[in-house]
Image (cartoon, helix red, strand yellow):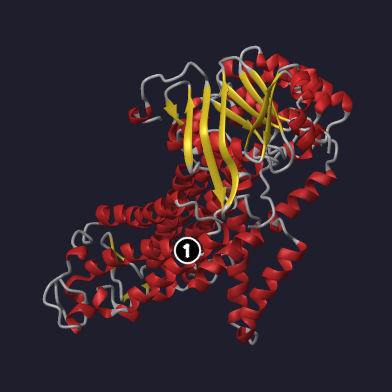
Amino acid sequence: MSQPANQSPVLTSSLLYLDGVSVSFDGFKAIRGLSLTIEPGEMRAIIGPNGAGKTTMMDIITGKTKPDEGVVMFGGSVDLTRLDEAAIANLGIGRKFQKPTVFDFHTIEDNILLALKSQRTVAKTLFWKTETPQQKRIDEILGIIKLGDARNRLAGSLSHGQKQWLEIGMLLAQDPKLLLVDEPAAGMTDGETAETAVLLKEIARDHSVIVVEHDMGFIRELGVKVTVLHEGSVLAEGPLDQVSANERVVEVYLGR
Amino acid sequence: MITRFLISGLDKRGLIFLAILAGLAVLVPLANLLIPPGSPFHIPTSTMSLWGKYLCYALLALSLDLVWGYCGILSLGHGAFFALGGYAMGMYLMRQIGSRGVYGNPILPDFMVFLNWSELPWYWYGFSSFPFAMLMVLLVPGLLAFVFGWFAFRSRVTGVYLSIITQALTYALLLAFFRNDMGFGGNNGLTDFKDILGFNVQAQTTRAALFAMTCVMLIAGFLIARGIVDSKLGKVVIAIRDAESRTRFLGYRVDRFKLFVFTVSACMAGVAGALYVPQVGIINPSEFAPANSIETVIWVAVGGRGTLVGAALGAVVVNYAKTIFTSGFMAPYWLFALGALFVLVTLFLPKGILGTAQDLWAKRRKPEPAAPVAEPAAAE
């Protein structure tokens, strides 16, 4: 669905490339000169105090918000700022929201079916028939997120933690090249948090993942490179231990 | 593929509904034509036409339920599509009058002669042909819905704002059709019909055929709507109703899906209007009145939003009550009763008659978990 006009020569080998991105709402600069690159297959954790611009950054990548200035490239050659949400999703960028958002009046299985990678046109969905390989994939995902027995229950009846998992399952079904995961461990018990970390590490083996999280223990468990955002730009970047030793980071975030 | 599409998701409730309609389509005309008037089983022609009218309303309610109950688009202007379908049929019927009009003009309908028009306006061409008129019954409401939806859904107009502009749409059409120089008969509308396909519109047999045709079209409308909501597209549409932006982030172009159901729904409403006109014998601008569209919303709410069968049931129940009410000493109070009904249903039967009955039924047979029927979230 991307127009040929979006296909410029490959400028970078990074999967996602943000350079000098700024956006303001009613005069408030939510993002100022943000630059970030994600390599193919990389998993990155993003931390930062409230209002640092984490969610706005995700809005920009997924097409919900258009930046005032800056470059946002995907796969080295696609300019994301020119595309809408649906086009970006079909390029292979999946998103999990901070507040788990599933389709409450659909069964768990139907939630996965709706997310399952397929052509999203009106005609194709009207005459859709689930074939065996697709059913197998749905069953497989239901197994991974441990909701196989509950497949016919309405998603609205799930607990908070289960909804988080269902949403991760929907991301898996989408099979995106890049997953944006906003606070996957929010509101989870310690046990659930640990299991979620295992699940995300599993997913990161064949997908690029960006995780936004507040929970330091969770980040430690992931054991990946960390980017600290503050007031809309990158404050520090590197392994967690190095970042948490940074004086500025301690000042604005950890040492509160 | 089409057959599978149409019959795949039929549940028990749908089958009962279809069986009743098929029974009505056969038995009512027979009871009217074959049983002599003295017998208690005879159905008078006026009663049959009255019920034909209810069933047209049922088809209109069904079309509204498709967009409101399943896609969350609260259209307060669905009466406009109904009326446009009605006008297309009315124009065909006017052209069939020929030289039997009061002024005896073989080409021009009476109201044009009265306005001293010398020739037929270009947009009346073709309406002497039944197939062309039937095409227009689908095309005119469908095209209006498509163009309107194209702009509204692409600009992401939703909720109350969308409802208000649909209301404005039907009101604008009401004012336009009132004008004599529009060429649709002004405030008198189109009436004094004589023939449909060569048969006298007033004849008992024609009325029976129209009644049966209405049942058939309601069956067809129900099968199409059922097919849509049971397909994966139906699931996408419910997803849009409950979490529109989430659906967008899954890669579905929400505006196109809305446009599809809105257009299909408008065509369905147009067919309902086309069947309505020959049975009531008149179409005039009052059919565009905003109050009509709002009443349609009440039928759907009373019957049970997001159930299809419930919408049709609600239309029949409310209109039957209206007939009883407005023909007796309580006539002046009908609008109060209608308002009270809407308030009471919203307060005490939020799922409508059918949704509530279904819950009771599910409770009685507890061991079996309630079927995952798509129930709408809180009203828009």
Task: Establish if A217 lies above or below A82.
Answer: above
Q: Which residue of the protein is positioned furthest toward the left in this rendering?
A: B118
Q: Which residue of the protein is positioned furthest toward the top in this rendering?
A: A205
Residue A47 placed where, x, y %?
A: 72, 31
Relative to residue B271, is residue B229 drawn left or right? right
Looking at the rendering, which quadrant does residue B302 occupy?
Answer: bottom right
User: Residue at the location (46% across, 19% down)?
Assistant: A12
- State which quarter of the image contains the C terminus of chain A: top right
Relative to residue B68, is residue A81 drawn left or right? left
User: Residue at the location (62% across, 23% down)?
Assistant: A173
Residue A148 placed where, x, y %?
A: 75, 22
Can residue B314 be seen here? yes
User: Residue at the location (58% across, 23% down)?
Assistant: A178
Identify the element where label 1 is drawn: helix
Task: Establish if B279 lies above or below B6.
Answer: below
Q: Amino acid at mark 1?
A: Thr
- State which quarter of the image contains the N terminus of chain A: top left
Can residue B230 be seen here? no
Looking at the rendering, which quadrant does residue B287 occupy?
Answer: bottom left
Q: Nearer the viewer, residue B264 or A87?
A: A87
Q: Nearer the viewer, residue A72 or B258?
A: A72
Kindly identify which residue carries mark 1: B166
Q: Nearer the viewer, residue A36 or A167?
A: A36
Q: Chain of mark 1?
A: B
